[in-house]
Amino acid sequence: MSTESPVVFQCHGDYLTGIIHHAEASASLGVLLVVGGPQYRVGSHRQFVLLAREIAANGIPVMRFDYRGMGDSEGEARTFAAIDDDIQAAIATFYQVCPNLSGVIIWGLCDAASAALFYAYRDERVKGLVLLNPCVFTERGAAKTYLKHYYLQRLLSPDLWRKIFSLQFDYRQSLGSLVGLCKKLINKAAVNSVTTQQIDRVDDKLDLPTRMRDCLQRFKHPVLLILSGRDLTADEFQEAVKQDVQWQSLLADPRISRHDFSAADHTFSSRLWRDQVAEWTLAWLKQLNTKTGSSSVE
């Protein structure tokens, strides 16, 4: 049985809101749920509430919160690349309310996974990451993924051919879209390549896949990676990994646990998919808490 309590805390003068899910017998590690982008807590994104309750019911405290400019929190809207201070303030509040914590696991989906990677290597309190369908968006990468995973599948769609034979297919719009994607694919942007040994902090001007790779390389704790099979964001991540030997080496590291969920969509929007994510997350968390010496997780 777990209880829930609201918290209000400050980040650069703005008031942020959150919910802490307490556990009767708390583990030494807690989970911070970072929500990516503007969301509402129904539909597929109800999973954040349900996941937090499931984890807390298994003896692991959880905090979820809205960063500045999102949901119930104050402040100007901002991108996931600019929420380091919000995460830091949330962790500080989590520690204040749950003083027995010895570390925090950050859990994030899509751009929240990217934000977690940007932050984690610089805070010694972060002992692990759960990353679902991390966002590595670049225009060229998105164009290549869309061409490979959308257009090829589209050609096999009976609905497409019905439209063509019934003269309902918009050739001009489709051709224009295809040409635009090809231009993005051909026009390679210059890649800012900086090795992690050259800088104390990963350069935030790097392209997104490179920046995330270098952040992961600096983070030395366990990571759980979950990728959907029916999701262009996950497809783009896998394409980026295929083209980068350093990414491949990182993901082969024993500290990285990985699950490929071929049936699931981007947000794991069915109960079956959501429950599977919760099961994988809990099993991984329990292993991690065992390694830290906690004996309170049931």
Image (cartoon, helix red, strand yellow):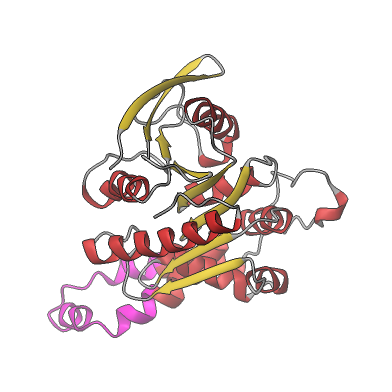
Outermost residue toward the top in this view: 13
Outermost residue toward the front in this view: 295
Q: In the image, which residues are magenta? A: 150-177
Q: Could you tell me which quadrant the N terminus lies in?
A: top left
Q: Residue at x 54, y 50 (%)?
A: 294
Q: Residue at x 59, y 68 (%)?
A: 240
Residue in the foreground of this view, choosing between 142 and 6: 6
Q: Would you say residue 173 sits in the magenta stretch?
A: yes
Q: Could you tell me which quadrant the C terminus lies in?
A: bottom left
Q: Residue at x 48, y 17 (%)?
A: 14
Q: Is residue 136 visible?
A: no
Residue in the foreground of this view, choosing between 278 and 56: 56
Instruction: Classify residue 77 by image quadrant.
Output: top left
Instruction: Classify residue 91 by image quadrant.
Output: top right
Q: Considering only vertical position in the picture, is 135 above or below 20?
A: below
Q: Considering only vertical position in the picture, is 80 above or below 7?
A: below
Q: Is residue 260 left or right of residue 168?
A: right
Instruction: Classify residue 2 by image quadrant.
Output: top left
Q: Position of residue 282 (x, y in %)?
A: 41, 58
Residue in the foreground of this view, choosing between 51 and 12: 51
Q: Position of residue 161 (x, y in %)?
A: 20, 83
Q: Main secondary structure of the magenta part?
A: helix
Q: Is residue 289 visible?
A: yes
Q: Position of residue 72 (x, y in %)?
A: 34, 26
Q: Position of residue 28 (x, y in %)?
A: 53, 44
